[in-house]
Image (cartoon, rainbow, N blue to C red):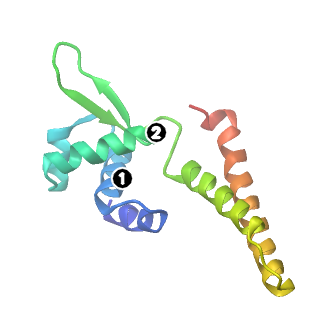
Amino acid sequence: MDEVASLMAPWGWSRHIARIFAYLLLRETPATLDEISEHLGISKSIVSVATRELEQYGNARRQSQPGTKQILYSAPNKRYGPFPDQAAMMGTIAALMVRQPTESAVVKGRLTKVAAFLTAMREAIDEVYERPEFRD
């Protein structure tokens, strides 16, 4: 689990969010905030904030437990990780690079190549998420 979490750091995820995401992926059943907190040794308040953030971006599912006020969290069925958000950011960066004013042909060429690379990466990620087996 910690290995998965450390690999998510370059994608901009905090260690707590990445560990909770990995924990949920590795569980067969949904978990309560108390269970997540106890198993990961993280305070319940941090777990609460992190799970809400994961849920907001579609990387965790929130479920109510019939007959109680307790909330359960599980890994999503089809969306995995921060990749759609990162793809959108790549598109934004590519657009900014193309619009950068410069009189240098060398700099313009470099920015154009980087923008093309980022655009291709964004399109590849978007294409994967459009496949029926990965749609929410």
Residue at x 50%, y 52% (from the top left corner): 82
Q: Which mark identifies residue 68?
A: none
Residue at x 76%, y 60% (from the top left corner): 120
Quadrant (top left/top right/bottom left/bottom right) for the C terminus: top right
Q: Which mark identifies residue 58?
A: 2
Image coordinates for residue 13, horizontal then vertical, percent: 40, 59
The residue tagged with tag 1: helix, strand or loop?
helix
> Is residue 50 depicted above or below 4 in this figure?
above
Image coordinates for residue 90, horizontal then vertical, percent: 64, 60
Image coordinates for residue 57, horizontal then vertical, percent: 45, 42
Image coordinates for residue 32, horizontal then vertical, percent: 20, 35
State which tag comes first along the sequence, 1 or 2: 1
- Crowding around mark 2 (Cα neighbors within 10 Å: few <14, some 14 to 19, many 20+) is some
> Is residue 82 depicted above or below 59 in this figure?
below
On the picture, is 5 further left or further right than 31? right
On the picture, is 134 further left or further right than 117? left
Q: Which mark identifies residue 22?
A: 1
Quadrant (top left/top right/bottom left/bottom right) for the N terminus: bottom left
Q: Looking at the image, which residue sits at the far top?
A: 67
Residue at x 68%, y 56% (from the top left corner): 91
